[in-house]
Amino acid sequence: MSEFLQQLINGISLGSIYALIALGYTMVYGILKFINFAHGEVFMLGAFSGYYIAGLTGAQGNTFLGFLFVIISTMIITAMVGVIIEKVAYKPLRKETKLTVLITAIGVSLFLQYTGQLIFGASPRAYPNLLENFKINIGEVSIGSNQIIVIAISILLMLLLTIIVKHTKIGIAVRAVSNNLTASALMGINIDNVISFTFILGSSLAGAAGVLYSINYPSIEPLMGLLPGIKAFVAAVLGGIGNFAGAAVGGVIIGTIETLTVGYISPTFRDAIAFGILIIILLFKPTGIFGKSEAEKV
């Protein structure tokens, strides 16, 4: 039982990171109805931003304030990256077919991956020790302080996102555009600003996820965003693409199942399990756990 609880805690910690990334996928899909496959690379840029910010500012002294400075600065940088990607790559294609935008998203993803290799180098780098990671033992279960911080900050960011979306003027505009883009434009909502704001929110969460992931798995390289990005996409589909609560729940489920697979079956299947879940969901409930079927007009 203690081993199961240990794996469960590890899974929730990992799943919290997937949830943050999945929220970016689901926000963009909710408004533009396409999957931003470059989102995993924003996560990677978040990890590297934290790496360089920590080195330049000396925020490696195991202080919580230094850690907060790194994560907030990283969120600002990745928010800017997200807006640039939207303005340069996606905005000119809004009237094109979804297939055109999808191919562009894959192209942006590959561009960021290999540009990252050119700038950062292909070799893995050890992540700086931003916080002292000590163990808290509860019976036979051991919880790392970094795991607690990851879960706590993830929950805090999700709550802030919920407040922004449900209780601010721009958040109401985001929900309106997600519900009906054409009607929102007729009511005077600036669609461009709403879309840019959506990319700001989603990309900043991915940047935070990059730092949180790296303090638990302290080795980064330019291709690190590929698998977490895909697993977060599976989490968004599992929860119901376009649904915030679904993205959060889906992320925790995927992280937990992945960790239990490593602990009880084989580490070989840790990446395959996400794709297996995706196939099952698409076969039996394509709309996901919280998703709703929509009638399509022809």
Image: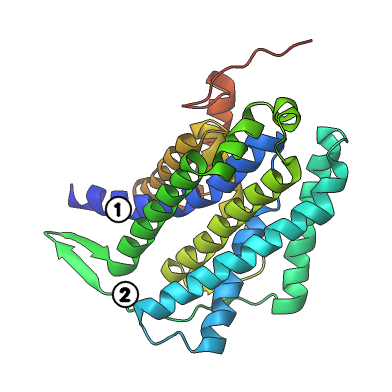
Q: Residue at x 30, y 48 (%)?
A: 8
State how many labels appear.
Answer: 2
Q: Residue at x 50, y 78 (%)?
A: 127
Residue 98 is left or right of residue 141, and the answer is right
In the picture as drawn, the residue positioned furthest to the front comes out as 188
Near mark 1 (Cα within 10 A), the count class, few <14, some 14-19 or many ≥20, is: many
Which structural element holds mark 1?
helix
Q: Amino acid at mark 2?
A: Asn
Which callout, 1 or 2, points at the residue further toward the start of the chain? 1
Q: Which label number is shown at residue 54?
A: none
Q: Nearer the viewer, residue 263 or 132?
A: 132
Q: Which residue is mark 1?
A: 9
Q: Which label number is shown at residue 133?
A: 2
Percent across and percent down for residue 268 are 50, 51
Which structural element holds mark 2?
loop
Note whether 134 is above or below 22 in the view shown: below
Q: Nearer the viewer, residue 37 or 166?
A: 166
Q: Quadrant of the C terminus?
A: top right
Q: Nearer the viewer, residue 109 or 258?
A: 109
Residue 98 is left or right of residue 200, and the answer is right
In the picture as drawn, the residue positioned furthest to the top comes out as 298
Q: Residue at x 54, y 27 (%)?
A: 281
Q: Amino acid at mark 1?
A: Ile
The CA distance from mark 1 to mark 2 is: 16 Å
Percent across and percent down for residue 210 are 53, 64
Percent across and percent down for residue 22 are 54, 45
Near mark 2 (Cα within 10 A), the count class, few <14, some 14-19 or many ≥20, is: some
Q: Nearer the viewer, residue 244 or 134?
A: 244
Residue 75 is left or right of residue 36, and the answer is left
Percent across and percent down for residue 21 are 54, 51
